[in-house]
Structure formats: structure tokens, C-alpha cells
């Protein structure tokens, strides 16, 4: 699988990305269109690039943002970023990071983007299956309704098994019935 990276930053960011892609252990390519990217990269000192990254993330919430920050600023930015709308889930990497370290962050961010996109597709499929749940059509033979229910249960089990968040099913009385890893 090829991971697509878009540079929203300056030439220094592009040079750093090209160096990281050259040493990456996985296939990565630079793309011009943020809509095709798994990860968007820019520096925090570039207001226009930050705005573009935030806007792209709003339109494509699965796409991950990687911010390059000056070394002296890295810890402060890591503490601030969770409170910045549109950039709260951004990945932070120091501008002095080695190409290998940047490649590792890019790989993690792009992989997270791909996983989120797959989970959203699975969620859509589950919702489609549930919209045709048993009992939706009384004329449907029982065995077809049973097959549909089993398929919906498999989709839900797959979604829960791969979800990065914790899911817990709690009965109205507070008793826990199920949970994921």
C-alpha cells in the first residue's frame, strides 16, 4: 500500500519530506492534492498552511495533519495543540528530526488515516445492513432475515475489534454486557 503525503508548507518542509520518503521503509509519495493525501504536512510558523490544513481536515476528517515545529517550541505546542480547533489531533514533529524519525511519524499518521477511512467505510456498510435489518420487510423469508442479522453482527464485531477507542455495552441497570480489547 502506498501512503500519500501532501506538503502544505514551504520548501524546507518539502526537502524534509523528500528526505524522509527516501529513507522510509514503506512506500510513500508526495501528492499535490490534499484531498488525495493520507497526511498533510506543514510548519506551525506558516499561518496560510495551518489554515489550509485545518480546512482540509474539516472536509476530510480522516486525513491526519503533521506539524513541523521548531525544537524549542515542540513541548509547548504539544501541550497547546489539543485545544486548537481543527488541529487538535495533529501530530507534532521537531524541525530538526532526522529523516528516519520524520518518516516514522509520517507512517504512523498515514496509517491512522487509512485505518480511520476503512472504519468509516465499514460503519457505512453496517448502517446500510441495519437499514435492511430483519423485520424491515415482513414478506422476506425467515432464512434471509437470519442471514442479514448474522452479516450485520459480523460487521459490528469487526468494527468493534478494530476500533482504536474503547467500547463498552452497558445495560440500563449498569451491568456490563460486552467490551472490546
Image (tube, grey):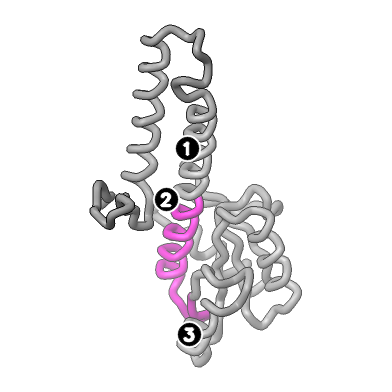
Examine the rendering and report whether any part of residue 6 can be seen. Answer: yes
Q: Nearer the viewer, residue 126 or 73?
A: 126
Camera-near label (3 vs 2) is 3
Task: Report the residue at 52% width, 46% height from top.
Answer: 117
Q: Specify the segment rendered in magenta.
A: 93-113
Query: In x, y percent, where is residue 127?
Result: 52, 34
Mark 3 touching mark 2, by CB under 8 A?
Answer: no
- Give the residue number, with chain letter if any, for mark 3: 79
Q: Dot 3: few (<14), some (14–19), or many (≥20) neighbours within 10 Å?
A: few
Mark 3 and mark 1 lie on one chain; the one further toward the N terminus is: 3
Residues under labels 3 and 2: Cα distance?
30 Å
Between 177 and 48, the one nearer to me in the picture: 177
Asked which secondary structure carries label 2, the reply is loop
Q: Residue at x 46, y 87 (%)?
A: 75
| Outermost residue toward the bottom in this view | 72
Q: Measured from the top left, where is residue 22 in percent x and y?
A: 48, 58
- Residue 143 vertical placement versus 158 (above, below): above
Dominant secondary structure, magenta? helix
Q: Look at mark 2 in the image and give the residue it sits on.
A: 26
Where residue 23 sits, quadrant-wise, is bottom left
Q: Which residue is mark 1?
A: 122
Tell whether 7 sits left or right of 67: right
Q: Residue at x 27, y 57 (%)?
A: 174
Q: Position of residue 148 (x, y in %)?
A: 41, 20
The answer for how far apart the CA atoms under marks 2 and 1 are is: 25 Å
Q: Secondary structure at mark 3?
A: helix
Graded by Cα atoms within 10 Å as few (under 14), some (14 to 19) or many (20 or more), the crowding at tag 2 reads: some
Amino acid at each position: 500500500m502506498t501512503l500519500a503525503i501532501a506538503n502544505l508548507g514551504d520548501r524546507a518542509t518539502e526537502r524534509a519530506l523528500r528526505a524522509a520518503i527516501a529513507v522510509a521503509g514503506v512506500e510513500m509519495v508526495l501528492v499535490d492534492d490534499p484531498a488525495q493525501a493520507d497526511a498533510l504536512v506543514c510548519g506551525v510558523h506558516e499561518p496560510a498552511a495551518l489554515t489550509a490544513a485545518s480546512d482540509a481536515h474539516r472536509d476530510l476528517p480522516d486525513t491526519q495533519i503533521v506539524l513541523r515545529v521548531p525544537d524549542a517550541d515542540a513541548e509547548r505546542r504539544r501541550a497547546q495543540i489539543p485545544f486548537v480547533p481543527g488541529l487538535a489531533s495533529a501530530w507534532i514533529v521537531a524541525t530538526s528530526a532526522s529523516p528516519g524519525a520524520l518518516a516514522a511519524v509520517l507512517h504512523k499518521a498515514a496509517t491512522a488515516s487509512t485505518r480511520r477511512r476503512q472504519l468509516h467505510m465499514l460503519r457505512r456498510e453496517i448502517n446500510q445492513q441495519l437499514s435492511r435489518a430483519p423485520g424491515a420487510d415482513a414478506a422476506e423469508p425467515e432464512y434471509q432475515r437470519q442471514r442479514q442479522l448474522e452479516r450485520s453482527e459480523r460487521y459490528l464485531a469487526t468494527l468493534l475489534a478494530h476500533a482504536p477507542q474503547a467500547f463498552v455495552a452497558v445495560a440500563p441497570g449498569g451491568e456490563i454486557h460486552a467490551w472490546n480489547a
